[in-house]
Image: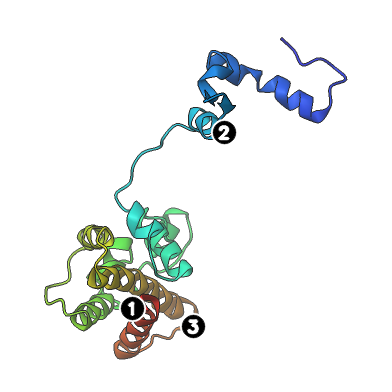
Amino acid sequence: MPIPNGLTWSLRKIWHNREVFLQANGVDQFVQAGKFRIQKMYKFLHPVGAQVGWKRLICNSHASPKSTFIVWLAVQNRLATKDRLIRWQLSIDGTCGLCQLASENLEHLFFSCSYSQEIWNQVLLSLGVTRTVLPWHEEVQIAVKKSRSKQKQACKYSIAFIESVYCIWLQRNAKVFRDHVDPIKTVVSNIMFNVECRCQ
């Protein structure tokens, strides 16, 4: 049935959305204890999306918002690494600027690159973790697992992971745009300072 002429904007919107109530077999589905529940209507309109394993790492993080945002992009493989820029038809040198040894992609940048690997290794040692640095996806899984714990050390680990990824990304950008990279010791000090500040 077409929308009648002469209706106000709000009435037009209501008229247009009457289909929602028809699909739901009336308004009764959204009523609880005699009151209309917006939450029920919202859940009807927006069914639950796919569950992602990294949700807790991102949503419950005590790390800085900008660091968390960069990790959110990274876990979805949405950072503008050189391999992605090349796929977007940009003519650039695809070599990793930090180590100059391999093509830059997400897995290389975090933590196959010798520069980023050494940063993460030093951060792990600062946290009292003695193990080898693992590939990106395995490190993400460990950080996700730690983010589920309420223990202070696990919280520190999650923040350290997020801040490390962010600082490595900043160093990568500094190399690309200013041809400058800070010494590993300086980067690790900055990361651990941020971790300690965020854990207070």
From the image, tell me which residue sits under label 1: 98
Q: Residue furthest right?
A: 6
Query: In the image, what residue type sits under mark 2?
Result: Ile
User: Is 154 placed above or below 175 here?
Assistant: above
Q: Quadrant of the N terminus?
A: top right
Q: Give the SS element for disc 2.
A: helix
Q: Is residue 7 left or right of residue 157?
A: right
Query: Counting residues from the N terminus, which is met first, the one under dot 1 or under dot 3?
Result: 1
> For the residues marked 1 and 3, what is the alpha-carbon distance in whole angstroms?
12 Å
Query: Counting other residues with Cα less than 10 Å from the Cα at mark 3, is it few (<14), some (14-19), or many (20 or more)?
Result: few
Residue 166, x across and y down, in percent: 39, 72
Q: Is residue 89 left or right of residue 164?
A: right
Residue 42, x across and y down, in percent: 53, 33
User: Is 135 placed above or below 3 here?
Assistant: below
Q: Give the SS element for disc 3.
A: helix
Query: Counting residues from the N terminus, which is met first, the one under dot 3 or under dot 2?
Result: 2
Residue at figure coordinates x 30%, y 66% from the top left: 103
Residue 178, x across and y down, in percent: 49, 83
Residue at figure coordinates x 34%, y 70% from the top left: 165
From the image, tell me which residue sits under label 2: 38
| Displayed quadrant of residue 131 | bottom left
Q: Is residue 111 left or right of residue 86?
A: left
Query: Counting residues from the N terminus, which is met first, the one under dot 2 or under dot 1?
Result: 2
Residue 59, x across and y down, in percent: 40, 57
Q: Residue furthest top?
A: 1
